[in-house]
Image (cartoon, rainbow, N blue to C red):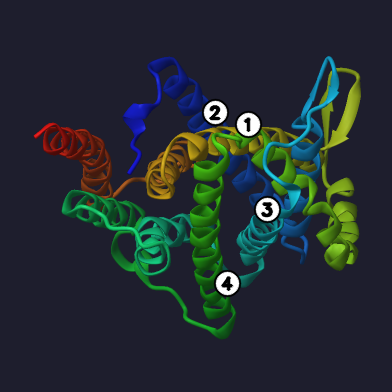
Amino acid sequence: MRSLTYISISGWLNILLQVFGGCCSNVFVLEDLLYNNKSEYSLGTLVTFSQFLITSILSIPISTKGFIRPTVPVSRWIFPVVLYFLTSLLNNLVWQFDITVPMHIIFRSSGTVVTMLVGYFFGNKRYSKHQIVSSIFMTLGTIMATLPEGNSLSIEINIKFLTGILILTIASVISAFMGLYSELIYKQYGNQWHESLFYNHFLALPLFVFVSPTIYREFGVVLQSKQVTLGAFKFPRQLLSLTVNVLTQFICTKGVNMLAGETSALTVTVVLLVRKFVSLILSVIFYGNTMSTSGMIGSIIVFGSAAYYSISGISDRKIIEVKKET
């Protein structure tokens, strides 16, 4: 199984900057967008459509000679495109089901375990005990870090909330299958993350016709938001937040696609798990929340487990190389 160390230092730093810088900024702006949204709409559908549209435009595969012909047959992208569309839409729809940003981070942090289960039962993958232990501890550590202290832990369970949890569960499973299928494409056709970035977004645009009425209504909400002044111009605050969110999403998605082209589906999930934890820390700092004792312990577990995962990957490859030589 591929690991992080197969990427060059400069390449790894570039991916880190895009994944952590772009994705963490994206979540932070999204939280601000949701916090200032006083309407009955979640804005999730508009956010998803805007991200797909702008990413498609910014990632068009062109060169000085014109449009670059795809290495991977376009038909091979149809299945992951549908999965990616569903996952993105579902993850942005949950805001109207009493799912908060911290709860969203907690639940999606289980992605590592889901990826391992899907890979084991459907991808004929086998993971070392080091990978299993580190992945489980990373998930547990992130959950500990996001659990509030004292009486604030109580959550009113209702049908609306349970519906949100069900949507997140479905999205996690779909995402795991998408990662597994994308890994097969990379193995067959090589690292074609540029094509993945463009076609996964561009081919999904026609699917938004089914939710176009919602997009139209949510865009009206954004345009009617409070005005802010930038120089000599005034803009709706929510429109500016949406613009920043879309641009940072492009940077984030580009980094994740680069990572997926260089590593396994499990490694991608692990990196994104740590990224979600960093997003949580930034949310705590900038929104004035305090971190509990369990939160600090959880942070140590997450980063310690991530380091253990990387080190165990090096050790496992050395053992394989020794066996091959003997």
Check disc 3 and report the residue beneath it. Answer: 76
Dot 3 alpha-carbon crowd within 10 angstroms: few under 14, some 14 to 19, many 20 or more? few
Q: Nearer the viewer, mark 3 or mark 1?
A: 3
**Do residues under tags 3 and 2 come within 8 Å of each other at their CB atoms?**
no
Amino acid type assigned to the residue bearing label 2 in the image: Gln
Give the x, y percent position of residue 316. Answer: 18, 40
From where the camera sits, is residue 38 visible? Answer: no
**Do residues under tags 1 and 2 come within 8 Å of each other at their CB atoms?**
yes
C-alpha separation, residue under disc 1 versus residue under disc 4:
26 Å
Mark positioned earlier in the residue sequence (1 or 2): 2
The residue drawn where x is 37% and y is 46% is 270
Q: Nearer the viewer, residue 79 or 303?
A: 79
Check disc 4 and report the residue beneath it. Answer: 167
Check disc 1 and report the residue beneath it. Answer: 251
Q: Compared with residue 123, is residue 9 higher up or lower down, i.e. above or below?
A: above
Residue 239: mark in rendering:
none
The residue drawn where x is 70% and y is 48% is 200
Quadrant, the N terminus? top left
C-alpha separation, residue under disc 4 versus residue under disc 3:
26 Å
